[in-house]
Image: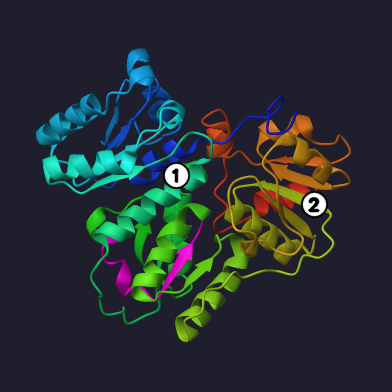
Amino acid sequence: MTQTARIISTYTADVSGVNSALFELGGMTVMHDASGCNSTYNTHDEPRWYDHDSLVFLSGISEMEAIMGDDDKLIRDIVSAAQQLHPRFIAIAGTPIPMMIGTDFRAIAAVVERKTGIPSFGFATNGMHTYVQGASMALAGIAERFVTEELPKTDDISVNLLGVTPLDFSVNGSAEHLRTALEQRGISVVSNWAMGDDLETLQKAPSAHVNLVVSYAGMGAAKVLRKRFGIPYVTARPYGDWTDTIVESIRLAAKNGDSMEPMTGRINPSAVVIGEGVSSVSLANAVTYETGIQVRAVAATEIERSKLGVSDCMARDEDELMPLLQGAEFIIADPLYEPICPKTAKFIRLPHEGFSGRIFRSEIPDMTEDISYITQAIAGRS
């Protein structure tokens, strides 16, 4: 049976991606779901919940509302909360139940905005896709509604970091070190979408020369900013010494205005890395760059084929994955993938918050500036 997780876990859903992308931006996020599910979105999928204030609510849809529908109640509850809390914006996201009853989130958001005067978004997420798709929709919505003014470019070459959420970067310092790694190489950072910067900072995005899409969650915003302001984007996540190659691509994109996907030649891979598309491709490039070992990236979340290398591929479920792992000398993946990996391969644990949640959070390495965690494991020195 395909598209069934018999052995491995599943990735965080699209609705949690919306919440994660918007968590620090001063808005109010409403998940239209049954009572009790807020703990999934906030205490399991959101590591910032205990030390960062954010307005995240659940509609508490009942069985009768699920059968008959009651959009008026949902609208009344949202309007009442917004009038008391005065958020910068309102985001309403869906789950499987509203999908089955055909809830029109854009229409509900339009009514809420008319009643409150607060910019409102309706995201037709449904729990059937990964966090990457929901986060991309959310950040694209922010770019559409709030980044509207053309600004002079910074004097030095600069970037916006797009697609930064703890589902890919955890809370181990990786998000902060993205900025450090680039600044050490002469690239300044205008805004981080969206960990560590507020909505006002994101509105300065047009002053950057290039958008650096560090996970596919940032692709929606990258396309909006490209269309509106002509900002080219480079799709890559900094890892170790391979960051030098990314910086070369940023400088070239700033010069000629073309979007780019920097790659290291990987033709006959003997190793595999599994995970979020942009991160996996970038780590495969970085390991190949530093060790010479050819690595194939297997994207287990949504990504365009054009963002992958020639030897890379997409595989969403275990029946697709298992044949791809046969013959691999090394496999780099979240520990929950190990049961489907061949015993002949050396398994290198790389926990991923968006896949195994908080179970292995203390093991997640920060490899932004140093990938020796991987290279030493390959060399048998870990």
The spot of residue 33 in percent (x, y) is 37, 25
Residue at horizontal 58 percent and vertical 52 percent from the top: 367
Residue 169, relative to residue 226: is it above or below? above
- Viewer-proximal residue among 136 and 275: 136
In the rendered image, the residue lying farthest to the bottom is 256
> Which numbered disc flags the more N-terminal residue, 1 or 2?
1
Q: Which amino acid does label 1 sit on?
A: Gly
**In the shown orientation, is residue 360 left or right of residue 225?**
right
Q: Local crowd at mark 1 within 10 Å, few (<14), some, or many (≥20)?
A: many
- Viewer-proximal residue among 138 and 110: 110
Q: Say which residue label 2 marks.
A: 271
The spot of residue 247 in percent (x, y) is 53, 73
Range of magenta residues:
201-215
Residue 206, relative to residue 299: is it above or below? below
The spot of residue 239 in percent (x, y) is 59, 59
Residue 246, relative to residue 199: is it above or below? below
Secondary element at image label 2: strand
Q: Say which residue label 1 marks.
A: 134
**In the shown orientation, is residue 291 left or right of residue 52?**
right
Residue at horizontal 73 percent and vertical 35 percent from the top: 318
Q: Which amino acid does label 2 sit on?
A: Ala
Secondary element at image label 1: helix
Residue 239 appears in the figure: yes
